[in-house]
Amino acid sequence: MMKSRGKNVGKFFHTILKWLIGIICISPMYVAIIYSLKSKQELAVNRFALPEVLYWENFSQGIVQSNFFNALKNSFITTSLATIILTVICSMASYIIARKNNSKFYNSVYFIFVAAMIIPFQSILTPLYINLLRWGLVNSLIGFVLAKSGFQVAFTVLIITGFVKSIPRELEEAANIDGAGLYRTYWQIIFPLMKPVIFTSVVLNALNIWNDFQISVTILQKQSVRTLPLTQYFFFGENNSELGLAFAVFVLSMIPVLTLYLSLQKYIISGITSGAVKG
């Protein structure tokens, strides 16, 4: 009886703990949504209650005043280009590193990639800005894409390499017997098998690039090339008394990445755990 009561009490507190953690995680989203749907007058009366009347004008005004669609276009272009570059280059590099794991050279290259992940961003910010300024890539979306891709290469190679090691070599040997070359073997046989980890890297890289603030605030200074995080930052600073407008822009900015994450979420854990087994 005592053991049964102890188990029931443990389950009760475990359930309470899960509810508390869930409320803490959901509360920022709740605040953002209800703020975006309230007028300035209603926010002044009660900020955390549900809105009595849905004030959709916050969204229409926020889109116009923040130049939202231009920022959305910039974020979409930079995220798409950087994600494609990382997917193509890092997947091929990871394949070679994984298959040449008996070579000291390729092992050294792999450890260089791993070591690059611990380099503090702040230590190379100034050299990065100086180089981009010399090349005329400051206030350029291409400059941001190149800089952000460079920072994400090490992480992408790390997670893909571990997954490639789990793919049987016999598939490549059979392809070679049939006369397939290296590129044909990779693109027609190996790359399709990498779908789980490719989707994982796509989602993680896209989220990281889309939400980037540190690099974008350093490189993208003109309003015409600002991404969504920068637009939100400056728009909130200019409209800190209009919380409804600011949070309406926040909510609109969440929709694309939330859609991407929910549509591909099943691949994230499977891709990371598969790579961890052999990595």
Image (spheres, grey):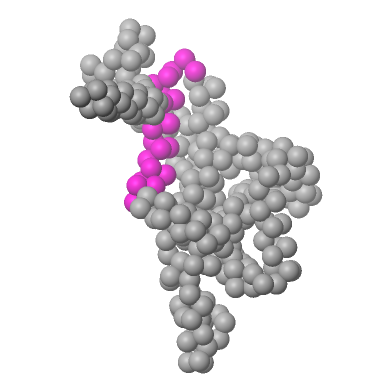
Residue 186 visible? The answer is yes
**Quarter in which the C terminus is drawn:** bottom right
Q: Is residue 260 above or below residue 246?
A: below
**Residue pictured at 69% horizontal, 58% vertical:** 111
Residue 274 coordinates in the image, percent (x, y): 46, 59
Question: Relative to residue 178, is residue 13 depicted above or below?
Answer: above
Residue closest to the eye, 54 or 158:
158
* Residue 222 locus on image (x, y percent): 63, 38
User: Is residue 248 on the magenta stretch?
Assistant: yes
Residue under the point 34% across and 47% down: 262
In the rendering, at what x and y percent does residue 22 appear?
34, 29
Q: Is residue 192 left or right of residue 205?
A: left
- Name which residue lies at 54% across and 46% down: 209
Q: Establish if 169 lies above or below 267.
A: below
- Answer yes or no: is residue 41 visible: no
How many numbered discs sit on the rendered protein?
A: 0
Along the viewing direction, whichever of 78 and 154 lies nearer the viewer: 154
Start-end of magenta stretch: 240-263
Furthest residue to the top? Answer: 45
